Image (cartoon, helix red, strand yellow):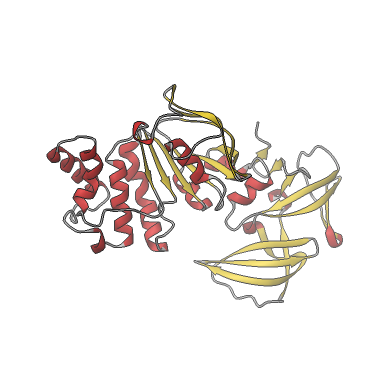
Amino acid sequence: MLEMHDVSRTVDGEVHLADINFTFEAGKLYTILGRTGAGKTSLMRALMGLLPLDRGQVLLDGQDITAHPVWERKMAMVYQQFINYPHLNVLDNVAFPLRRQGVRKAEARARAREFLELVDLGSMLDRRPSQLSGGQQQRVALARALVKEARTLMLDEPLVNLDYKLREQLREQFPRILERNRNSVILYATTEPREAMQLGDEILVMHEGRILDTGPPEEIFDRPANIQVATIMGDPPISTFPGVIEGDTLRLGGGISIPGIRRALPGDGEYLVGVRPIDINIPGPIPAQVAISEVSGSETVVHLITPFGDVLMLSQGVSSYDPDERLEIGFVADNLYFFSTDGRLISAPYGEERA
């Protein structure tokens, strides 16, 4: 068990970590999701002992390790910029941390070979890093972290510098690769919501050095704690705009009205309304104008201008939309999110606000 109590760090007036309190349990894979600069790397480096803290404690199995140096923490980390020793072959790259721990050469090489087999590099033991592809080099770095069988394994955006095909391949392999370390605490930082949901047993959503929300992936996606979490969890993100509830009718800017609101809300009044891009349909009663469209794989993301604000629409398949093209869109009232004017979740399509 790994604990953080009131962990904070500020550098030149900029908050890197703010009152972080969290307990990581062994046997779980935690994905830390947030945009660049959210504090993901700072959190991991604080756990490793690579960053001094302004205040707070880090505990491992109840022992305060806040002041312990890196080499005493039984932790391993894989960085987005994979680092391998160019003068060593693949086998010796992975055996290196064991040799530094005093493990005999034969035993270190045997364990290294086992973990290289695990990451599908068993046939490349004698190659140098320069003879490997980017994906293979990242797997060498991963095997070197895994072989230590550390109490805590941290992966800081390990796939970000790989091309799309390699990322998809390694994402599929990660659950099998990490199974050997299931008795460890595993943290995986990413900026991609889909990756966080695909890999994690539990997600931590970070923004500006703070943890905004935690929980199982489906729960965070379906019932985000607030509008910021809902935006971070979406790819493409949720669209939000102001609205007023009057009875069972939602009134939006530009004189747009949507009847049939059957949600349990605190009452009439002002709300922030959210709609996910996949829940916008054509045709509908709302006039919209295309700003730009982007093809993303087998989907098309369309940026629309409406009387009540800008929204994103996700169209399945590759579609062609011209700038300034006029469309008529709609969305199902039952699929809308309602937030308070300060951003707190009030009502979601899949249940009310979480406790």
Q: Residue at x 21, y 59 (%)?
A: 128
Label tally = 0
Toward the viewer: 350 or 159? Answer: 159
Residue lying furthest top in this view? Answer: 62
Is residue 27 depicted above or below 195 in this figure?
A: above
Say which quarter of the image contains residue 177.
top left
Q: Which quadrant is home to the C terminus?
A: top right
Residue 202 in the image: state x and y as whole percent: 50, 38
Residue 330: percent from the left, percent from the top? 73, 61
Q: Is residue 5 visible?
A: no
Reply above or below: 326 against 72. Answer: below
In this image, 308 relative to 322: left or right?
right
Tell me residue 283's x, y (percent).
Answer: 71, 67
The reply, left or right, for residue 58 in relation to residue 16 is left
Q: Nearer the viewer, residue 111 or 198?
A: 111
Please name the residue shown 71% across and 76% down the image: 325
* Nearest the eye: 6 or 244: 6
Q: Residue at x 53, y 46 (%)?
A: 33
